Image (cartoon, grey):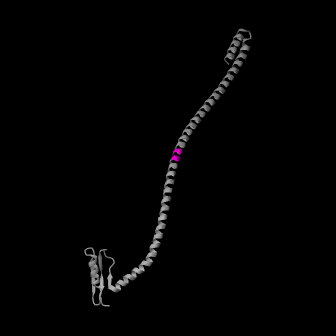
């Protein structure tokens, strides 16, 4: 380009020295004007292209920065998810252990409940046999001794009423301060020997 300008300048000097100066000068000026306009058009085009390249580079670098930021964010989220997964796995293992322990406890409780039901059944069977005979013995003692006992007293207190032929006598004996033999003798004294 610069060479063309220099060539054109030299051509102008030659033309000026020659006799056809006006006509040739006009041609050179037109040629120079065309060249200058073409130079401006090329310069504008190059400027536009360079501006486009710069804009593309800016956009590409911004996209690259955005992608790097997104990649960093994704890596942080991935790390966070991996930590959360590890914590959940640990909790799951703990819960599995607790579940196994609770299942063993439940099984043990079921076994205990079964044993209790078996024992309850045995007790129920025994009481259906023992209580009627105990009631019979208590009724027999009442008929023989004519003593009606109070059962809601303390264990060492014997309280009741002896219904004699003519007289009802209250009984109140503290067995913790007297011997068993003395208590037995006192109770037998209420029983009539007349049959």
- Of helix, strand and loop, which mostly describes the magenta segment? helix
Q: Is residue 175 above or below residue 147?
A: above
Q: Position of residue 94 (x, y in %)?
A: 49, 52
Placement of the N terminus among the 4 image quadrants: top right
Q: Specify whether 71 is left or right of 14.
A: left
Residue at image position (63%, 30%) is 53
Vertical order, 112 against 172 (above or below): above
Rendered location of residue 80, percent (x, y): 52, 44
Residue 83 on the magenta segment: yes
Per the image, is 7 magenta? no
Q: Is residue 71 above or below residue 126?
A: above
Q: Quadrant of the image for the C terminus?
A: bottom left
42 relative position to 85: left or right = right
Q: How many marks?
A: 0
Name the residue at 51% across, 56% down: 100
Horizontal placement of 171 versus 60: left or right?
Answer: left
Span highlighted in magenta in the image:
81-86
Q: Position of residue 83 (x, y in %)?
A: 51, 45
Q: In the image shown, does 98 or 74 lie closer to the viewer? A: 98
Q: Indicate whether 42 appears above or below 121.
A: above
- Residue 28 position within the rendered picture, expressed as x and y whole percent measured from the top left: 71, 16
Work out whether residue 47 or residue 24 is closer to the camera in this orientation and state it.
Answer: 47
Image-quadrant location for residue 181 = bottom left
Q: Residue at x 70, y 14 (%)?
A: 7
């Amino acid at each position: 380009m610069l060479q063309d300008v220099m060539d054109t300048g030299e051509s102008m000097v030659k033309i000026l020295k020659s006799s056809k100066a006006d006509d040739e000068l006009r041609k050179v000026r037109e040629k120079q004007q065309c060249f200058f306009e073409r130079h401006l058009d090329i310069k504008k085009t190059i400027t536009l292209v360079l501006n486009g390249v710069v804009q593309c580079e800016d956009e590409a670098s911004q996209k690259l920065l955005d992608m790097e930021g997104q990649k960093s964010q994704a890596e942080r989220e991935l790390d966070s998810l991996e930590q959360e997964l590890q914590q959940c796995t640990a909790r799951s293992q703990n819960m599995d252990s607790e579940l196994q322990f609770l299942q063993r406890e439940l099984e043990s409780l079921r076994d205990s409940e079964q044993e209790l039901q078996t024992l309850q059944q045995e007790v129920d069977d025994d009481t259906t046999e023992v209580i009627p005979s105990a009631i019979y013995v208590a009724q027999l003692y009442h008929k023989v001794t004519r003593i009606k006992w109070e059962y809601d007293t303390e264990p060492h207190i014997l309280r009741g009423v002896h219904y004699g032929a003519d007289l009802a006598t209250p009984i109140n004996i503290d067995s913790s301060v007297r011997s068993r033999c003395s208590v037995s003798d006192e109770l037998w004294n209420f029983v009539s020997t007349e049959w």
